Image (cartoon, grey):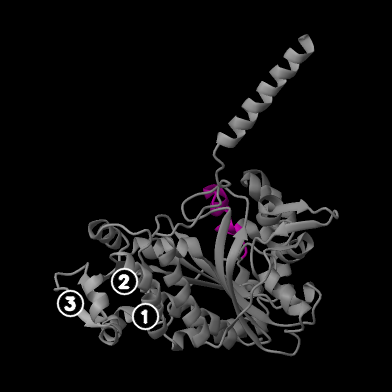
Amino acid sequence: MAHRVRNDHRQQIATKTEVTSVAKSIQAIRGMNDLLPDQSPAWQQVESIIRRVAASYGYSEIRMPVLEQTALFKRSIGEVTDIVEKEMYTFDDRNGESLTLRPEGTASCVRAGNQHGLLYNQIQRLWYMGPMFRYERPQKGRYRQFHQFGIETFGLPSADADAEVILLSARLWKAFGIADQVELQLNSLGSNEARARYRDALREYLEQYKEQLDEDSQRRLDSNPLRILDSKDPNTQQLLEEAPRLSEYWDDESREHFEQLRALLDEAGIRYTLNERLVRGLDYYNRTVFEWVTTALGAQGTVCAGGRYDGLVEQLGGKPTPAVGFAMGMERLVLLLQEQNKLTPRRAVDAYLMPLGDAAELKAAAIAEQLRDALPELRLVTHCGGGAMKKQMKKADKSGAEVALIIGENELATQQVTVKPLRSEAEQITLSHAELIDHLRPLTQA
């Protein structure tokens, strides 16, 4: 008897646990957000402009997997960087292989180019768009799953390739209508050898003030002293006022390259600010580095950044190949455009088809398909589930459609459709099917 009671009690506990687990709502992972239907039209508009501008410069899309071998990012980004040390989502799979959700796109693009023979002795202009992953504190416009658009150019060592990617980014700001809200900051790291000489000189200078540096800068002093130039600590920034300047260590070829780039940008009317402390956070950059910054989102923030990385292809197992590119965060870009009221996405629905009565419901789908055949760009919703005219009209209005298309007994008998405007004071009209197609065509171009 006692045994049965214990079993009954265990069953009750199990049942209670099962009910509790079923009832508990599962939420999205912190910093990884859903993009809801009322938000996606803005993203679609931004993506459409990006695709159009990239194509106008002759760039082709490449799509890479979001999961890569961890070694790819350690070798490219650098092991002593915040991304590798603190932010990567890394785990061992069932075979014990270390894998990482990509934190940025350039390394993946180079890996794909090497693997598929796209880079050596070739010129490639590539772009990509998709999710990236970094474990950092979520904040407005910066999430753990975020999206980037990237441009990568391979096989062109000259400054005109640098100018091209900067001009492409500048054209995007024009297309978005925010050219007056962003500022270009420009610098050169010089050659890898010049950068190494400067790194030694900077380390030697800062060693005398090591105890006055902030904690992160002290840690970086031996491993990656150039990253100290990015420090936001006021005391460290003050110490850097008397530090050696990067331009003092440029080799002649790098100096000539940078002067040619500046001449090309000047000729094209691109305004910029020279920023000798701009070094970028990834180890693979050399020569040109640049950032587009804005104050329109509060404190100054970067919305696009890039530069030249001539050694990365060889570093990842390919033949020596010059390269230059940039990436921009989509969340921050969309946020900036929304703050500036620059997004006017096309409505989700152009027309809402309302069949009134059994006979009309029987014909509605066929009529809708005929309209879609004639007007492939028309965004047409057909009412489903029946109901009185008043109920259907409420749903038509809620859909955001420009017009309601009404088919009742009279319209069926005369092979016509009544068009009722929902967003204007215009009178409703009744048209033949052929007339209806011509009447709806302007909606597909709005």
User: Residue 373, how many percent across, how many down?
Assistant: 42, 83
The mark lying in front, picked from 2 and 1, is 1
User: Taking the image as drawn, is residue 343 in sight?
Assistant: no
- The part of the image, by quadrant, that contains residue 357 is bottom left
- Magenta region: which residues? 229-244
* In-front residue for pair 391/119: 391
Q: Residue at x 45, y 89 (%)?
A: 267
Q: Which residue is mark 1?
A: 371
User: Taking the image as drawn, is residue 43 in sight?
Assistant: yes
Query: Which secondary structure, mark 3?
Result: strand
Query: Which secondary structure, mark 1?
Result: helix
Q: Amino acid at mark 3?
A: Ile
The mark lying in front, picked from 3 and 2, is 3
* In-front residue for pair 339/217: 339
Dot placed on the residue nearer the N-terminal end, 2 or 1: 2
Dot 3 and dot 2 residues touching (CB under 8 Å) = no
Task: Say the numbered circle drawn on residue 351.
Answer: 2
Q: Residue at x 68, y 54 (%)?
A: 88
Q: Is residue 243 magenta?
A: yes
Dot placed on the residue nearer the N-terminal end, 3 or 2: 2
